[in-house]
């Protein structure tokens, strides 16, 4: 009971601190007093009467006190952080005693969507929480979009949690780098949902639908399940046609569901990127133009140093975090001009090319050996608009037009998926 009361009292103190101004100026006055006593004394002697001689002695005294005051004054500023540091040992003791009541079981402190905290403040928040839980049986878990997290700040002293030293990074999503592994994992998740209902994946998905569903999801389990739900609804509601089976998801169903999910991804971009949202939209539009209009395909390459050393490279990594482009692996390019340079390959999210330009796109099946080889073309190297001066004509494909009009469209893009 005493532990609970202390917890409530601490909570009230923290709520009061939350309502207090970010910083406040305080004044301390010190009063010094000094008293001085002044005294006066005297005797009066007199004779009384002539018959009986007598004498009378009268004494009198008077005192007066005089007080002198001196005041000293000091001003200082107190911030919320000062209040939190004062509360830290109390929070720590409360946690320690609470953990003792759990019979040795540990606890998790989970911070979800941590990227909504200002990036400048994130290292300070994490440093404080680390101070509170350090050496206690408490696991601190911080979740957020990678490009919006700033867990560590160099300085004297350094501030925050350094990944690889104080904390480990765990990605919650697979990438398409290992397409087969991603496909196996995602289908295991879907199979676990379908099994209690005696529904087999092969009965619900065509072979083309299975591959397209993984491609459209980018390896993200949440997107995979959302796309499967939306595509299944389309497959169930359509009228029966000879080349598109009813109640069975095809690649075309996934394409339509992906286009429907596009608006949600744009909204996520706005919410998750804040003031950088418009800049990322412009970068995505330029990448899409390079892939779809310039090369007529769905993939592009970026030199690894550019990803880490340029502002536009950081924007592409941010788009990958937001699942608007997907990483598909590292590779080299078949060109002596780029010998020794490592490139990172990306594919556009399917929602970017299921619209009016889809019939002109030659999809590179990067998960197959032939497609992997196609990724090594120098013409796929992306550079920002205004610096591009070459196309596929610079490599061994010079005999072809940059957009290969002889290639068939993506299966299911125009309703011609008859064999699946």
Image (tube, grey):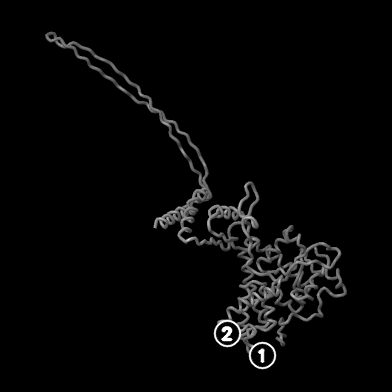
Give above or below for 21 relative to 316: above
Quarter occupied by residue 197: bottom right
Say whether marks 2 and 1 touch (CB < 8 Å): no
Q: Secondary structure at mark 1?
A: loop
Query: Is 327 positioned to the left or the right of 137 in the image?
Result: right
Q: Nearer the viewer, residue 379 or 284?
A: 379
The x, y position of residue 281, in whole percent, is: 68, 66
Residue 261 placement (x, y as % from top left): 63, 74
Return the x and y of residue 68 as percentages of the image width and height.
41, 28
Vertical order, 253 against 395 (above or below) = below
Question: Is 364 left, or right, of 218 in this rendering?
Answer: right
> How many residues crowd mark 2 within 10 Å: few (<14), some (14–19), many (20+)?
few
Residue depicted at x 51% and y 44%: 25
Kindly identify which residue carries mark 1. 241
Q: In the rendered view, does 371 fall on the left or right side of 245?
A: right
Residue at which label 2 appears = 198
Expressed as whole percent of the image width and height from the top left, the position of residue 402 reads: 82, 73
Q: Nearer the viewer, mark 2 or mark 1?
A: 2
Q: Is residue 417 left or right of residue 13?
A: right
Most foreground residue, 64 or 198: 198
- Name the quarter where the C terminus is drawn: bottom right
């Amino acid at each position: 009971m005493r532990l609970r009361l202390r917890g409530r009292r601490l909570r009230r103190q923290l709520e009061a601190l939350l309502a207090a101004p970010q910083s406040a100026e305080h004044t301390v006055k010190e009063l010094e007093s000094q008293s001085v006593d002044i005294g006066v004394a005297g005797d009066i002697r007199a004779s009384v009467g002539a018959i009986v001689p007598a004498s009378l002695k009268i004494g009198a005294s008077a005192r007066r006190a005089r007080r002198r005051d001196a005041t000293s004054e000091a001003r200082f500023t107190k911030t919320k952080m000062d209040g939190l540091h004062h509360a830290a040992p109390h929070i720590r003791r409360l946690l320690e005693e609470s953990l003792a009541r759990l019979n040795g079981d540990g606890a998790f402190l989970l911070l979800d969507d941590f990227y909504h905290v200002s990036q400048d403040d994130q290292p300070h928040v994490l440093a404080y929480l680390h101070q509170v839980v350090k050496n206690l049986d408490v696991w601190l878990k911080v979740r957020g979009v990678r490009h919006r997290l700033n867990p560590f700040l160099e300085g004297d002293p350094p501030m925050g949690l350094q990944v690889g030293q104080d904390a480990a990074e765990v990605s919650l999503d697979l990438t398409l780098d290992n397409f087969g592994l991603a496909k196996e994992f995602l289908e295991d998740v879907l199979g676990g949902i379908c099994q209690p209902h005696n529904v087999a994946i092969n009965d619900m998905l065509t072979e083309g639908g299975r591959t397209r569903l993984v491609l459209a999801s980018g390896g993200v389990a949440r997107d995979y399940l959302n796309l499967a739900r939306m595509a299944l609804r389309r497959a169930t509601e359509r009228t029966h046609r000879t080349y598109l089976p009813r109640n069975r998801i095809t690649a075309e169903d996934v394409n339509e569901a992906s286009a429907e999910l596009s608006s949600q991804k744009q909204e996520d971009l706005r919410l998750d990127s804040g003031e950088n949202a418009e800049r990322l939209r412009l970068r995505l539009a330029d990448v899409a133009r390079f892939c779809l209009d310039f090369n007529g395909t769905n993939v592009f390459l970026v030199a690894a140093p550019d990803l880490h050393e340029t502002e536009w490279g950081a924007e592409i990594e941010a788009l990958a975090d937001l699942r608007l482009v997907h990483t598909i692996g590292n590779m080299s390019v078949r060109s002596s001009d780029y010998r020794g340079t490592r490139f990172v390959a990306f594919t556009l999210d399917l929602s970017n090319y299921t619209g009016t330009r889809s019939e002109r796109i030659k999809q590179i099946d990067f998960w197959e050996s032939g497609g992997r080889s196609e990724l090594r073309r120098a013409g796929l190297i992306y550079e920002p608009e205004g610096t591009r001066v070459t196309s596929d004509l610079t490599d061994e494909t010079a005999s072809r037009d940059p957009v290969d009009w002889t290639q068939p469209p993506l299966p299911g893009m125009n309703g011609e998926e008859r064999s699946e």
